[in-house]
Structure formats: structure tokens, C-alpha cells
Image (cartoon, rainbow, N blue to C red):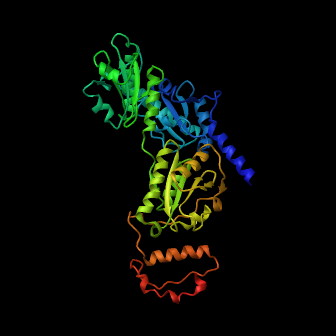
Amino acid sequence: MRAFLGVLACSLTVLSVHGLYSASDDVVELNPSNFNSEVIQSDSLWLVEFYAPWCGHCKNLAPEWKKAAMALKGIVKVGAVDADQHNSLGGQYGVRGFPSIKIFGANKHKPEDYQGGRSSQAIVDAALNALRSLVKDRLGGKTGGTDYGKQSGGGAGNKKDVVELTDDNFDRTVLDSDDVWMVEFFYLTCCGILEPEWTAAATEVKEQTKGKVKLGAVDATVHQGLASRYGIRGFPTIKVFRKGEEPEDYQGGRTRSDIVARAMDLYSDNIPPPELQEILNEDVLKKTCEDYQLCIISVLPHILDTGASGRNSYLEVMRMMADKYKKKTWGWLWTEAGAQMDLESSLGIGGFGYPAMAAINARKMKFALLRGSFSETGIHEFLRELSVGRGSTATVGGGALPKINTVEPWDGKDGVVSIENSVRVHRCLSLLFSNTPFLAFPQLPMEDDIDLSDVDLDDLEKDEL
């Protein structure tokens, strides 16, 4: 069994590193290095699929996508981005699930979502309809606002998008900002070649990151204090500034596409972590586990066992891990012990050993359990092994996602001992000790609390514990 799981893990790793398309296909393979030149600066209409190699739906779409690309050859461009490998591109265009198809038409910076069928005929029909709309807009004099983004004559852009930085405004504008800054230190007599590229990149980065990454420029001829402060010895020099961190040297190319690619990587680094959700109903579990490569699920101790402070400490560890692995296409969920017993049973957690954590691949119906400590270090080791395709896995009980109870969200408060909680605890105990009959509690209103001092524990038979 262990050997089989090892083979399975290796096969998952192989699938995660090989794309679905090859150079022999009519599908153009796109990545951060060529996306700007191929798509954004192109006059052509583009259909772009954002996919992940491990995604079952993506594998099913691949032959239809290839057929559509062959049929549209010379008419409409068809491309594909491995968004699992190039997640900065996926994040740039709001990709949250796979496959996602975008239509890059008149305004390349605001692509439309494709909502049609997944057959080659449906894709071709949608492409031709989009093409007709594009031609109609051009006949009507509409350009879609993309002309400024082309590099004719050495590049174009709005010079106002490059923020002029000085000794007086640098700290306030850059160092105190929550945004990421790329700052060019230039000298008037030497840096004319970079200027149009920097300007064009600034305009594009402003649109694509919604202003979260900014480009600025310091005239070191005038503001020599700033240049000296950051050890500038040659021109032009570009530095990256992130709040609370030491500035780093930019080591990339000096074309607009190079600058934009680095800016998008910085933007991806700076995106918020995925939301940590409580499993309140079946839709939450189904959507998260089906939309993401993995869903990371924690089963936390009952609120009566930890109180609000204890639970919040566990949730904070999960949020830290979600932030650390935010570039991964993983969903993050939690539930309280005993709230989703079918889920616990299907993952082999079974009523004890809380807090527990499992990572589920819903497409394979495989899961892995955290064997180490529920801590930043323990979870990091667990997730690191998963991210490289290692670690033991097992099949989800029943071969499908289990039934999920609809529950009320946690109110953030300490627990209160009540009949409902007493019943839940006894139900958990009954599941642990299968030979024990379920205890019949008196029919009291579920919303009324019960004072345990009123319960004569001697009335309980010993064989019922």
C-alpha cells in the first residue's frame, strides 16, 4: 500500500509540472515573459485559457481547445497559461478556478469572461461573435483604449503615471505607503533610453495592478541626497521598496515587458491571503474543494474545551499558513469537533486528536493528514511536503465528499454549557464507543441552559460511560 501511495504521489508530481499543450499544437503557450508582447500589444483578438495541469476539467477541455485553435488559425489567436506555474498571471486577471477562459478584445486590459460551452464548436462560435463585435467597434471609431499601450516609436504611456519623487516627498510617498514601489534613480545626461520604457510600463502596471504597484523616478542630478542615502553609484538604477523592508535592487531587463513582468510578480506577492471559511453548509465545502487544487481543512476542539482565546490562537495559525502559501491555489476551511461527524469519519479523524488537519484533493478523492504538531512549524512541514508531491495519502471514505450539516457560524464568544452541547458531546462519545447505546436526554427546550449542579450523576449507569 505504501509503495502504491508513493507511486501516486510521484504521478501527481509529474502531472503538476507538465503542461497540457505542446509546440506542435496551434495553442500559443503564454507566460509572464511573452504575455505582454503576444497578447497585450497585439491587434488580434485573443482567447486565453488559464489552466492547471492537475485539473480534471482542464484535461477534458484540452482536446476541444486544440480543435478550436486549429479552426481559428489565422483568424483569432488562441493561447493558454499554466496558471499553476505562472500564478502571477492568473492573479492579475482574477483567476480563482480552473479552467478560466478570458477574451482579450478591444481593450486588452479589461478582458471579458467566457461563459459559453466547453465544446470546440461553442468556443469557435463565441470567438467569431467577439470578432464581429471588435470589427463593428473599429468601424464605429472605437479603439478600446489600448493604443497608448503599444510601443510604436520606442514606447508610449502617460508620463503622469510615473510619480516624480523628491527629497521632500520620498518618505511620505514611498516609505509610508502600503503599496509596492519600483523607483528609478536617473541622471539627465545618461538615461534617455530607459525613460520611454519606464513610462509605458508605469501606465500598464497602474491599470493591471489597480495602483497597488507604483513606478516612480528620482532625478539624482537634483536630489543627490536620496541617491547617496541608497548607495546609488551608477545610472539608471532601479530599486524595489516594500513597507517595513529593506529596499532591494532590481535585476531584470530594461524593456517595458521586463519591468511589467517584475511588477506583476511583486503584485502577486502582495495580494491578500485566501479567506479562511467555517464549514457552515454543503455549498461551502463543495465549492472550495472543487474550485481549488487542494482544500486544507482543520477540525478544531469544541469551544467548551478551548474557549474563544484558544480557538482564535488556532485560527491565527491557519491564517498565517494561508498567507504563507497564498500563491498556491488552495482553499482553507475549518469546523468544530463534532459539528461535521461524517466529514471527520471520512478523513479518519473520528472524534479525538483535536486539533486535526487534512488536505483533500477532491478530483482524486485523496487526502493526507497532518501527523506533526498543529503549529506554524508542524503545518509548514506538512504543506511543504504536499507542495512537492510527497507524503502519504489515502482515499476519502466512501469515495466522495461526505454529507455536511448546516450549522450556525461561531459567534466569536466562549461556549456555554447547554443541553444541545451535552447531546453533542454524548453523541461523540457514543461514536467512540460503538457498543454504548445512545443516551436519551429528557425533552427540554434546546435553547434553555442546564445547570449541571441539578444533574445527579449517580443516576447514570456506569456501563453507559
Quarter of the figure with the C terminus = bottom right
Q: Is residue 434 above or below residue 316?
A: below
The image position of residue 4, as x and y in percent, is: 74, 51
Residue at image point 45% right, 84% down: 443
Name the residue nearer the viewer: 133 or 41: 41
Residue 259, percent from left and from top = 44, 25
Residue 277 lies, with reference to residue 152, above or below; the image says below
Which residue of the protein is positioned furthest toward the left in this rendering?
168
**Could you tell me residue 432's position as x and y percent?**
60, 73
Residue 435 visible here = yes
In the image, farthest residue toward the top = 189
Could you say which is closer to the camera, residue 191 or residue 195? 191
Residue 147 visible in this rendered orientation of the protein: no
Quadrant of res 428: bottom right
| Image: 338 above or below 137 | below
Residue visible at 46% across and 62% down in the picture: 280
Q: Kindly identify the residue that appears in the image at 62 percent across and 40 percent down.
A: 16
In the picture, measured across the screen, residue 63 lies left or right of residue 404, that is right
Classify the position of the N terminus by image quarter: bottom right
Q: Considering depth in this image, is 61 or 148 the residue closer to the camera?
A: 148
Of the pair 38 and 62, the residue shown nearer to us: 38
Task: Give the residue furthest to the bottom.
Answer: 459
* 453 shown above or below 160: below
Q: As drawn, is 238 to the left or to the right of 63?
A: left
Q: Find residue 101 and report its horizontal and vertical position in percent.
A: 51, 38
Is residue 103 toward the left or the right of residue 56 in the image?
Answer: left
Q: Residue at x 49, y 83 (%)?
A: 441
Q: How many marks?
A: 0
